[in-house]
Amino acid sequence: MRLKRVLRSLLRRTGYDVLRFQPLTHPLARRKRLMEQYAIDTVLDIGANIGQYGQELRRDMRFSGNIISFEPQSAAFELLKKNAAHDPKWEVNNFALGDKNGTANINIAGNSHSSSLLGMLSSHIDSAPSSSYIGSETTDVKMLDSIIDNYCSVQNNVYLKVDTQGFEHKVIKGAEKSLERMRMIQLEMSLIPLYDGQVLFDDLHGLLTEKGFKLVSLEQGFVDQRSGHLLQVDGIYHRMI
């Protein structure tokens, strides 16, 4: 045991670490166990970017159910489409989810995954300069309530993942009826304002609690590398009622 501690200490000095892939020590193993516990068979991947989350589900979590991804950026969507092309149970869609049906301008970030329908604040840019906006484009926006029946039935055990860079509350607002059909929700939640007009952790947590969901796990998200401050987390919720 002492030898393991010494080896791990030496490894950490090089900037690496080794964790056992089990719920006690690894966030992905914990999420995998939760999804198995609640028999999740369908994942709605809102804010898919190029498909990182779907690849993680398949590669690291051995999820074999349906994945339905939504990504509004045209360039990111083309890569998403390629990454999902050989997976018959992975469907991709090129539009955003929000609180109304229509169109909107999405701001394109230099690092792609920080792109948002909201303006970016200096707190985000200061923590990650590569995230600065470099352009914009028009995208379709749809309410989840208006399309949910196209992708899953009331018999499905659905996991709703929302990573929309400050736009999460708008997605939830457009899913008032759909929430009743969600078994679990994973939501990116900011601890400080990073986008103009976004809703922060406390209010999002209160909203989901009010809708009958219980927080069952937290995963670390965006960190300011200069200060070590945690700026975002992913809250994972299970529907209780």
Image: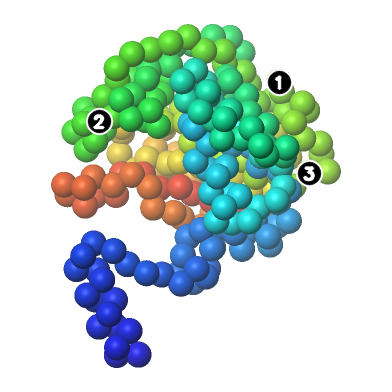
Q: Nearer the viewer, mark 3 or mark 1?
A: 3
Residue at (55% x, 56% y) in the render = 60
Q: Residue at x 47, y 60 (%)?
A: 27
Q: Which mark is residue 146?
A: 1
Q: Amino acid at mark 3?
A: Asn
Q: Earlier in the sequence, mark 2 or mark 3?
A: 2
Callouts 1 and 2 close, C-beta under 8 Å = no
Residue 159 vertical position relative to residue 148 in the rendered view, above or below: below
Q: CA distance from mark 2 to mark 3?
A: 39 Å
SS label for mark 2: helix
Query: Residue 156: which disc?
Result: 3
What residue lies at 28% left-to-right and 64% top-to-bottom?
A: 16
Disc 1 secondary structure class = helix
Q: Is residue 120 visible?
A: no
Q: Is residue 98 left or right of residue 227?
A: right
Q: Which residue is mark 2?
A: 130
Q: x, y percentage for residue 54?
A: 57, 42
Q: CA distance from mark 3 to mark 1?
A: 17 Å
Few, some or many C-alpha atoms within 10 Å of disc 3 (few <14, some 14-19, many ≥20)? Answer: some
